[in-house]
Image (cartoon, rainbow, N blue to C red):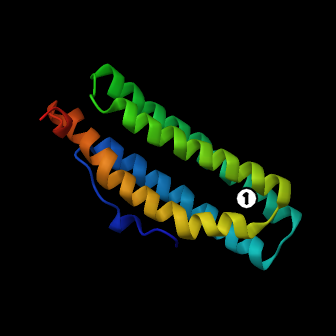
């Protein structure tokens, strides 16, 4: 297991926490496929990675859209900053998948999943999502204080 969902930071909105747990489940499943491919680099394992990666990307797009729609609907002051972080993350995910599909170099995926993703996810939840969830719940934002 790459990320222990029991150690994920929690935010003030239960639905956001549930989505984060779903994210981590998909990430952990994908990481296991990466390790399997590293042990047995064959076409079948490659296709499993491709399918799960696409599912993860699609889930992440839906996750971010949900948050962004709520932020816009509630006129969240920090929306542009939060959306920018989402856009950067999706661009990185897309670029990484393109590189993987072209090179089939498993070290690209493994490095991202070990060195980048867990830290980014935790920091994003602890900062952006914590403030956003509090605003969703209370209408108050530290950005407006």
Pick out the residue farthest to the left: 145
Pick out the residue farthest to the right: 43
Count of marks overlaid on the render: 1
What SS does tag 1 mark? Answer: helix
Q: Is residue 31 left or right of residue 7?
A: right
Residue 51 seen? no
In the rendered image of this protein, does residue 120 appear above or below residue 143?
A: below
Closer to the camera in the image, 83 or 8: 83
Pick out the residue farthest to the bottom: 39
Corner quadrant of residue 109: bottom right
Measuring from the top left, give residue 86's x and y in whole percent. Answer: 48, 40
Closer to the camera in the image, 128 or 81: 81
Q: Is residue 96 left or right of residue 90?
A: right
Residue 98 seen? yes
* Crowd class of label 1 (few under 14; some 14 to 19; many from 20; radius 10 Å): many
Measuring from the top left, give residue 9's x and y in whole percent. Answer: 30, 59
The structure residue drawn at horizontal position 62% and vertical position 49%, both measured from the top left corner, is: 93
Measuring from the top left, give residue 90's x and y in whole percent. Answer: 57, 43
Measuring from the top left, give residue 5's x and y in whole percent. Answer: 40, 64
Q: Classify the position of the C terminus by image quarter.
A: top left
The structure residue drawn at horizontal position 40% and vertical position 25%, both measured from the top left corner, is: 69
Closer to the camera in the image, 51 or 108: 108
The structure residue drawn at horizontal position 83% and vertical position 72%, both measured from the top left corner, is: 41
The structure residue drawn at horizontal position 25% and vertical position 43%, both measured from the top left corner, is: 131
Q: Is residue 44 left or right of residue 20?
A: right
Corner quadrant of residue 140: top left
Q: Which residue is mark 1?
A: 49
């Amino acid at each position: 297991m790459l990320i222990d969902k029991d150690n994920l930071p929690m935010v003030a909105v239960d639905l956001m926490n549930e989505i984060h747990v779903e994210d981590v489940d998909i990430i952990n499943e994908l990481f296991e496929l990466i390790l399997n491919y590293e042990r047995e680099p064959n076409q079948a394992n490659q296709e499993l990675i491709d399918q799960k990666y696409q599912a993860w990307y699609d889930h992440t797009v839906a996750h971010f859209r949900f948050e962004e729609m709520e932020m816009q609907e509630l006129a969240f002051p920090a929306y542009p900053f939060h959306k920018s972080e989402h856009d950067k993350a999706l661009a990185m995910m897309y670029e990484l998948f393109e590189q993987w599909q072209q090179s089939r170099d498993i070290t690209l995926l493994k490095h991202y999943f070990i060195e980048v993703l867990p830290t980014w996810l935790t920091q994003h939840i602890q900062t952006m999502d914590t403030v956003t969830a509090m605003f969703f719940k209370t209408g108050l934002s530290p950005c407006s204080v």
